Image (cartoon, rainbow, N blue to C red):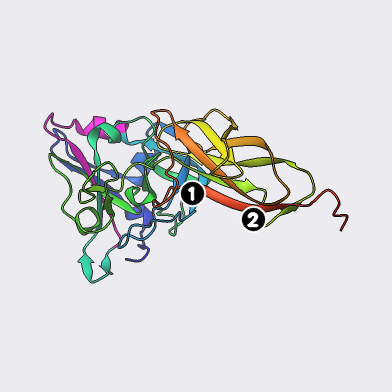
Amino acid sequence: MGAAVVDTENWLLVVDGMVQNPFALTMEQLLKLPRTTVTAFHECYGSPLKPPIDAVWRIGNVHWTGVRLADVLAIARPHPEAEYVWSEGLDYGTFAGVTADRYQKDLPIKKALGSEVLLAFEMNGHRLSKERGGPVRLVVPGWFGTNMTKWICRLSLQDRRAPGPYTTVFYNEIDPTDPSGSRKRPVWSVEVNSIITSPAPDTVVSASEVVIEGWAWCHEPVVRVLVTSSLEMPWTDATVKAREGFSWQRWRAALSLAEGENVIAARAISESGSEQPLSGRRNHVHRVRIWVKPETDVN
C-alpha cells in the first residue's frame, strides 16, 4: 500500500450508503464549506501485524485545517439505523499477503459527529502533500493515525463495521480489560501516555534537585502526572498544563535525587482515572537513567 497519486482537479468525495441524500463533492465545493482548525497530537500506532508492547514514540502535535465531517454528513442526512461511517482511501495494493482494492476504515457515528473530526486539506498552515494524505484526509483527534484515512475518496454510512482487512485482520489488539486475555478490540482511541524529554538519558548533573519535564497525552485530558526517582520511592505530583483542544500537555516537576544512578519514571493519569501501566503495554511508564555527581567530585 503506497502513497496514492491524486489529480486534485478531478478529485471527488462520494457520500453514500444509509443516507437520504447521497452526493459527491468536488474539491472546489469542499473548499466553499465552513472551515475550522483543530490542534491535536498525532500518534502512529505501530505495526498492524504485531501490536507493540513497547512505546513507539511516533508522535507530534499538528494544526489541522479542514471541514467538519459532521457538516458533510448533515448534507447527506443519515438514516437513524446508520451506526458507522466507513471511509475509503485511494491507496491500494498488497500488505502481508493480503490484497486490498482500497484502504478502508470505520468510525462509530457518535465519534464521527464530534466537532473535532475533520476532512482536512491543510497541515500546519500548508496544503496537504501527497505524502501526508493530500489532497484530503480524515482527521480523528484522540485516535491513532491508522483511523485517519489518507487520500480519502468515499464515506459510506452503514449499520455495521467495515469488512476490509484493515478493520478485520490488521489493527486489532488484546483488550487489557479482558481477564482471559483473549478478547480483541479495534485500535481506536489513544490510551494515556507520557514521555520524559528532559533530562536526556544518561545525563550527568551536579545538583541533587533536578527539574524533570515532558509531555503527556490521551484521548481525554490528562489530569495528573507522577514522577519518581525509583519505583520503591514515593511518587511526586508534577505541574500539568491544562489541555488545549486535543493537544499534548506539558508537565514539569522538581525531584531531590540521591548521588549516583537514578532511574526517573513518569506516570500519567487521565480524567477518567486511567493510569499508565508500569510494564507490558505500549503505553507503559517511560524511564530515563541519569547520574548525580557526588558533591566532592570536582571533575
Residue 296: say if magenta: no
Which mark is first along the chain, 2 or 1? 1
Residue at point 63%, 36% (across, down): 252
Crowd tier of the residue under label 1, counting other residues whose Cα lies within 10 Å: few below 14, some 14–19, many 20 or above: some
Q: Are the residues tagged 1 and 2 within 8 Å (C-beta)?
A: no
Q: Nearer the viewer, residue 74 or 288?
A: 288
Residue for badge 1: 127
Q: In the rendered view of the protein, which quadrant contains the C terminus?
A: bottom right
Q: Position of residue 96 (x, y in %)?
A: 27, 70
Farthest residue toward the bottom? Answer: 97
Q: Secondary structure at mark 2?
A: loop
Q: Is residue 45 visible?
A: yes
Residue at point 63%, 41% (across, down): 213
Q: Position of residue 198 (x, y in %)?
A: 66, 47
Residue for badge 2: 201
Image position of 113 with respect to 91: above or below: above
In the image, which residues are magenta? 70-91
